[in-house]
Image: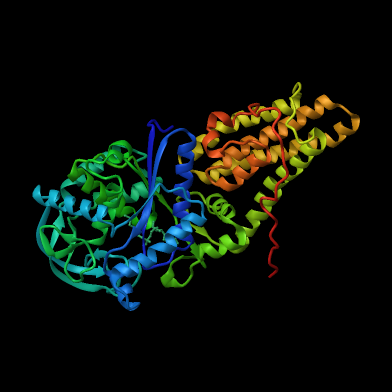
């Protein structure tokens, strides 16, 4: 259980030299589900995402388009903002590293760390990968190429500024050892422990080879190294150091891809320690979406545009698929077939049938009004026990961002409701004319659907709301469906049910 009243969750800020693909969407959707769940549990939430707009890579991309870097950034940030709207992302803020609020914070931090001797001058000689925006040592490079992406490296010899990360590494090691859930999942925690045990080097934090960055306040010939600039977004968005939001919401939960764990779990905590700021409460790393077994990325040309999928299948289906198909932390191979299968089996068949069998029966047998339940029999008792047993598991899974597990448990309930429809056979009861028993069955169905819809809210907010609307519940599902309400027998009697459009139409499966 989370113990605070406030919840601050962040996504990485996305490089704008790329247009958003499913990999980016995945991270933002996963963070959105966490934010929505936290709101449902009554916490005040600050959910931050944004764009990373400085650095050599962006400068080069802008030049290639014949544009100035700021104009290029202004243009390229838009597809991200638009996609998040289309995917129903409930972010409270969108930070761009070219905004003055951010630039100001970065410069303040540089001044502060420089003043206390944690940023100092030195000579950097080594290799730089522009694509990864990362420095590599001679021993790390492979056949003269970037060990991460295989691209050609630039030999960099610059008079630079360094951040004294090494000074803080022992304290960080201790923190990670004492806090087993600080870095999740465990494989990433072990990877980070090993990195630190092998030795943390001071980090080069300025560049002189190009201009597109935040000028160092004490030496304008240098611009900030893009990662040093970017990580600070998590503080600048809250108005660090004096902002009200900072006081309220810090520390953060950082959701990141596994490729950038080193920056978030090693360099960033060292920066925070140098500033005397509390460390993030958690750093959670997710896996990659692959296509043809390779990480999806524009440079490999194997990206899937989420916009096309939204046009074809709708935002909720995509959100469901991405969170249901693979456990957070694992890699997943994307396939349209897989997506269609999930839509057809889980959404159209299981969820859709539950809803679209029940609503017409409520209309037919109860004049569309939620009836007063009569005395339950064993069928209802069993169902109530099953729901009561599942709720704590679903809550705990959501809290840990174990969406696959949460959704599997919820779908266990969906199956149980579908089975209940068959076993209770309301059509037979109607034929026999047992009105009181029929009321019990119809109330139970509506009630189960109500709680299931509430439980899917973090993942499929629009479908959940539409389901509630069909049940005549006037309330906003997100505001009202706090988990205490995930219990059965809380549905109000007398609500007016109405038939809506099918939420998840079946998709024709492609024949090979
Ligand atoms: N700008 C940096 C992050 C700075 S955060 C202070 C960056 N940007 S990125 O656009 O390259 O990547 C952003 C996020 O998208 C990363 O967490 C990365 O793991 C994620 N993904 C990019 N491609 C991905 C997949 N194919 N699958 C899943 N996520 C992946 O790094």
Name the residue rendered at 13%, 60% in the picture: 161
Whether residue 191 is situated above or below residue 36 in the rendered picture: below
* Residue 230: image location, x then y, percent: 28, 56
Whether residue 61 is situated above or below residue 414 in the rendered picture: below
Q: Is residue 418 left or right of residue 406?
A: right
In the image shown, does 64 or 3 lie closer to the viewer?
64
The answer to which quarter of the image holds residue 249 is top left
Name the residue rendered at 49%, 63% in the picture: 290
In the image shown, does 293 or 509 lie closer to the viewer?
509
Q: Is residue 508 left or right of residue 150?
A: right
Whether residue 403 is situated above or below residue 178 in the rendered picture: below
Query: Exactly how many numbered labels are in the figure?
Result: 0
Tell me, yes or no, if residue 446 can be seen here.
Answer: yes
Q: Is residue 107 left or right of residue 358?
A: left
Is the image coloured rainbow, by chain, by secondary structure, or in one colour?
Answer: rainbow
Q: Is residue 252 left or right of residue 429?
A: left
* Residue 201: image location, x then y, percent: 19, 55
Q: Residue furthest top?
A: 375
- Where's the N terminus, which quadrant? top left
* Residue 433: image location, x then y, percent: 89, 29
Q: Residue furthest right?
A: 432
- Where's the C terminus, which quadrant? bottom right
Tell me, yes or no, if residue 200 can be seen here.
Answer: no
Q: Quadrant of ligand 1?
A: bottom left
Name the residue rendered at 29%, 67% in the picture: 70
* Residue 62: image location, x then y, percent: 32, 73
């Amino acid at each position: 259980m989370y113990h605070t009243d406030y919840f601050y969750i962040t996504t990485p800020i996305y490089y704008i030299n790329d247009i958003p693909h499913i990999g980016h969407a995945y991270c933002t959707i996963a963070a959105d589900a966490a934010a929505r769940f936290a709101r449902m549990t009554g916490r005040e939430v600050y959910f931050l995402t944004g764009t990373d707009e400085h650095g050599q890579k962006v400068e080069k991309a802008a030049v290639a388009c014949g544009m100035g870097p700021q104009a290029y950034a202004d243009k390229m940030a838009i597809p991200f903002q638009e996609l998040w709207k289309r995917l129903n992302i409930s972010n409270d803020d969108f930070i761009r590293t070219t905004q003055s609020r951010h630039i100001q914070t970065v410069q303040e931090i540089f001044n502060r760390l420089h003043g206390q001797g944690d940023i100092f001058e030195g000579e950097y000689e080594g290799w730089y990968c522009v694509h990864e925006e990362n420095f590599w040592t001679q021993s790390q490079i492979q056949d003269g190429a970037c060990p991460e992406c295989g691209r050609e490296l630039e030999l960099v010899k610059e008079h630079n500024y360094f951040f004294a990360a090494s000074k803080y590494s022992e304290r960080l090691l201790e923190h990670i050892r004492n806090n087993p859930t600080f870095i999740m999942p465990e494989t990433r925690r072990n990877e980070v422990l090993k990195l630190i045990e092998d030795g943390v080097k001071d980090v080069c934090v300025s560049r002189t080879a190009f201009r597109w960055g935040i000028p160092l306040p004490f030496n304008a010939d240098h611009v900030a190294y893009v990662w040093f600039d970017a990580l600070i977004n998590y503080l600048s968005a809250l108005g660090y150091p004096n902002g009200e939001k900072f006081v309220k919401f810090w520390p953060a939960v950082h959701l990141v891809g596994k490729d950038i764990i080193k920056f978030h779990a090693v360099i960033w905590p060292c920066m925070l320690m140098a500033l005397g700021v509390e460390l993030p409460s958690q750093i959670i790393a997710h896996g990659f979406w692959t296509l043809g077994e390779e990480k999806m990325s524009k440079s490999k040309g194997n990206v899937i545009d989420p916009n096309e999928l939204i046009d074809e299948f709708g935002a909720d289906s995509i959100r469901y698929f991405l969170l249901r198909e693979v456990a957070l932390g694992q890699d997943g191979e994307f396939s349209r077939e897989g997506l269609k299968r999930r839509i057809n089996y889980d959404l159209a068949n299981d969820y859709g049938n539950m809803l679209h069998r029940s609503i017409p029966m409520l209309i037919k047998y109860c004049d569309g009004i939620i009836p007063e339940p009569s005395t339950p029999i064993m069928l209802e008792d069993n169902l109530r026990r099953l729901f009561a047993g599942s709720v704590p598991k679903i809550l705990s899974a959501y809290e840990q961002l174990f969406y696959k597990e949460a959704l599997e448990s919820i779908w266990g309930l969906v199956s149980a409701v579908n089975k209940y429809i068959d076993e209770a056979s309301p059509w037979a009861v109607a034929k026999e004319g047992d009105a009181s028993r029929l009321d019990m069955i119809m109330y139970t169905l509506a009630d189960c659907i109500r709680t299931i819809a509430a439980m899917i809210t973090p993942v499929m907010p629009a479908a959940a709301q539409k389901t509630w609307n069909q049940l005549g519940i006037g309330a906003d599902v997100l505001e009202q469906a706090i988990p205490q309400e995930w219990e059965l027998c809380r549905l109000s009697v007398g609500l007016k049910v109405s038939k809506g459009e099918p939420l998840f139409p079946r998709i024709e499966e492609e024949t090979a």
